Image (cartoon, rainbow, N blue to C red):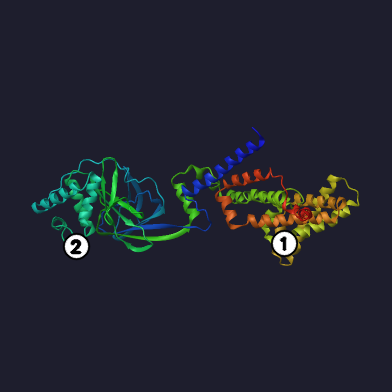
Amino acid sequence: MTAKLQLRIIVGILLFVGVGLTAFKHLELGFPLLPGTKETVWTAEAHVSFRATGEPVRVTLSLPVNTNNLLVVDHSTAGRGFGFHIEEEGRARKGVWQTRNPSGEYSLYYRARVYRGGLPDLINALDAPASPEKPVFSQAEGESADSILAEAYEFSADNEGLALRLVQSLTAQEPTPAVLALIGENPSRHVRVNAALRLMHSAGIPAERVRGILLEERKNSSRLTDLLAIWNGEGWHVIDFDNAQVGLPELFLPWQFGGDALYEIEGGVDSSIRFSVIADQISGRHAAVTYNTEIGSSLIDFSILSLPVEAQNAFATLLLIPIGALVVVVLRNIVGLRTSGTFMPILIALVFVQTELLTGLVLFLIVVSSGLVIRGYLTSLNLLLVPRIAAVLVVVITLYIALSVIGFRLGISEALSVTFFPMIIISWTIERMSVLVEEEGMKEVFLQGGGSLLTAVIAYLVMTNRYISYWTFEFPELLLVGLAIILVIGQYTGYRLSELRRFEPLARKD
């Protein structure tokens, strides 16, 4: 296998893995591709109020469950003088408040933080039910129920189709006489759902009521909405009465399933419950991290995002270095810029990231210029190489201290940023430029020094770009794409852009 073929295979693998992981994180894990993307998060609150009778109080409230569209991430409660815990009953969860010596009026609050995106539908995964008990109808109701069921059987093929046909009949704008006899005129949604439940049970088909709230932008008072859940032999399917379609509405948060009470109070009277919803806009990145942490995504557990914040900040800077390297490779191998050292411009760019561009340029020029003057004097002392570089290093550090102290005394706080400069690299750069002056002359120093500063400035602009810095941290797998580009450029042997002017006379002659 030739080296060129091996390189193509490696580049293909790097591109596939880098782009594939990025697409997976965006499409499956919900990480936004653009910085500043906002996601809607809802806070749903249940408010239970009652009057204590002087006996020990126990308040039980059904808690919301996850759907395939919504995920309850965390919760909080409030209730003066009450203890709170959660009880698991099968797949159902209930919140319980308790106290021994109550008196007067009480208000208890349960708040749930709800994110978009969820787990597999828990309602559909509930266990198979027992056969329902036949409801008792009056003679007139029984005749109406038989008529409605007969018509529904005729236009359906299975339990789901039967339920859909019943919902259509019960919600029709011009109901039949049999429907009017069963539910009356202008019935509420609650009455219609009750009628559907009785008809399904009469047909021997398991069915339950699903109660919940619709998450809207802002509602101080949200009413419970009733839906119908039917057993089709394999799982529970929910039917929406608003449009007679199978499936939970997208923003419907189930709060109660089945015949259990929504809430129960022992030791209290005159109770009531109210629901309210408020929507917040939060960072899409924060929403994705919270959601994937809640569902236990292994990609989050073994990523930079699982590290302490201090370590994350360090990696946020380190991940910019490969971007600077890519800029250097493009400018040197494609454009043809000449720099002092291969990757010294990257280090200078990192300094600019810490000090801001203008401040970094001024400080760099001051330190390097002063260092070159002092290095020229040290040359006249005929020092050996290593002691000379060590002496330059000491001089550079002394310059750092002097600039910081003088700038601080003059009220120039930017002068303190000089401490971010890599002292060893600056010392070696001064040494290399001094050698260039002796061997090639000042012209070569200006060419390489100017090329280094121009490369550092371009690298700084790229590394501090809002989108680049976001992508490198949130999608570090994109660095594999950068590596693939570097490998491709590594085999480029054509003319550089700076050489076009050199050969322009030949092209003009032709």
Residue at figure coordinates x 9%, y 54% from the top left = 140
Say which amino acid is labelled 1.
Answer: Ala
Side (left or right) of 449 relative to 230: right
Which of the image's four quarters has the N terminus?
A: top right
Residues at marks 1 and 2, CA–CA distance in whole angstroms: 78 Å
- Position in image of residue 271 (x %, y %): 26, 59
The answer to whether 341 appears left or right of 150 in the picture is right
Tell me if 249 is positioned left or right of 157 in this view: right
Q: Position of residue 113 (x, y in %)?
A: 40, 54
Q: Which residue is mark 1?
A: 415
Circle 2 is placed at which residue position? 186
Is 384 left or right of 306, judged from the image as shown? right
- Classed neighbour count for the residue bearing mark 2: other residues with Cα under 10 Å, few (<14), some (14–19), many (≥20): few
Tag 2: residue type? Asn
Residue situated furthest front in the rendering: 510
Q: Nearer the viewer, residue 188 or 485?
A: 485
Q: Residue furthest top?
A: 1
Can residue 119 be seen here? The reply is: yes
- Residue at horizontal 82 percent and vertical 52 percent from the top: 433
Residue 285: x %, y % from top left: 50, 53
Whether residue 420 is visible, yes or no, is: no
Q: Tell me which numbered mark, 1 or 2, is placed earlier along the sequence.
A: 2
* View extreme (left): residue: 139
Q: State the image coordinates of residue 345 (x, y, percent, origin top left).
A: 72, 52
Residue drawn 91% across the image and 51% down it:
381
Element under disc 2: loop
Asked if residue 481 is positioned above or below residue 357 in the image, the reply reads above
